[in-house]
Image: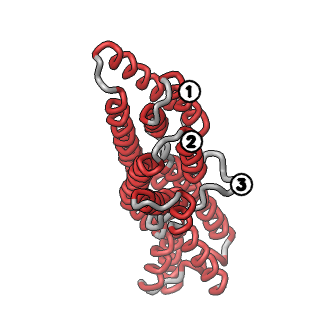
Amino acid sequence: MADALLRWVNSFQAKVHSLSASSPSEVEQSLRELAQKTERVASLLTAGLSPRDATAFADLDLTSKAELPKSSPESFLRVVWNFALEAGAAPATVLEVCAQACAEAAENARHARVQLAGPQAATNLVMILPLLAIAGGFVAGYNPLTFLFGTVMGWVLLLGAVGLMFLSHRWSHRMVATAQQWEWSRGMATEAMAMSLRAGQSLAQARSWANDIATSFSLNKEMALHELTRCDEYVELASRTGVGLYGLLRSQAQRERNAAREDAQMRVEKLAVRLMIPLGVCVLPAFIAVGVLPLVASVISSTALNS
């Protein structure tokens, strides 16, 4: 019995660890590494190295034919690199823009992860309340496990509590996963359009490439359409006022990344409130089932035997 309880505790700790926000996600790590390597390649290109030597020294493979996930940051960087070489754009300038965009996207992911740590820590703490209640019964001189494992009602309460805790874990995990979803590619289509114009391509070519980037890498198609609409608005503004379109697009790309960070923070703030729902609906009844009721039964049983 003790071994079974220990295995359950270890399994529960593993589930709690899976909800931890302390470790960076794969996308965040990928963006941060890409930003560092891309900045290194840009510096080497500026120093006079050839594109082939610069990427080799920076350990950044941009010419491999190996298939990458379609919407990954690595795939986006490879597309931008090929564009720079084919369009005759200065690779160093293009990669500096990509490095900045990747670094800011990684920082947005880190910010969202840190903001999630508080709600997740509170959830993990509350989810161990049933175990603390059982331990408290032993400290008080009673044995709640005798009631839980020795009676039919105890088994009913135990199984019900386990089911509620599993439901709370799945429910909370899904809510956290939803809050962690964010658009690393937000602003990239605008950056692509600006890079295309800087390379000397026509407005139609730049707009077409921005559309391809938004279609290929954006997870939220509605948000991508809104970003492209903003690009069209700046095109019209530049044509009416004569203001440089490149600067307008770069500024808009920065605003898009700032908006992505604000959206992530808003989702985390909402999550802190919504996580109270599975705690109240599932964890509290489970706490009562395995912590309060067995303790009450043990007290009553001890009182009856003493009398």
Residue 276 x %, y %: 42, 51
The residue shown at (43%, 55%) is 106
User: Label 1 is placed on what type of residue?
Assistant: Ser
- Label 1, secondary structure: give it: helix
Q: Which residue is mark 3?
A: 65
Give SS at disc 2: helix
Task: Say whether disc 1 or disc 2 marks the residue closer to the N-terminus.
Answer: 2
Quadrant for the N terminus, please.
Answer: bottom right
Nearer to the camera, 279 or 20? 20
Looking at the picture, how far across and down is residue 103, in whole percent?
40, 54
Residue 52 lies in quadrant: bottom right
Apparent side of residue 76 relative to residue 133 in the rendered image (left or right): right
Mark 3 lies on a secondary structure that is loop
Residue 218 at x, y percent in the picture: 55, 38
Instruction: Tell me the distance, in whole angstroms, between the alpha carbons under discs 1 and 2.
Output: 13 Å
Disc 3 to disc 1, C-alpha distance: 24 Å
Residue 279 visible in the snapshot: yes
Image quarter of residue 221: top right
**Residue that badge 1 annotates:** 208
**At 61% from the left edge and 74% from the top edge, which residue is drawn?**
11
- Calculate the distance from the C-alpha at mark 3 to the C-alpha at mark 2: 16 Å
The tag earlier along the polypeptide, 3 or 1, is: 3
Q: Residue at x 29, y 18 (%)?
A: 242
The residue at which mark 2 appears reads as 83
The amino acid on which the numbered mark 2 sits, given as a three-letter code, is Phe
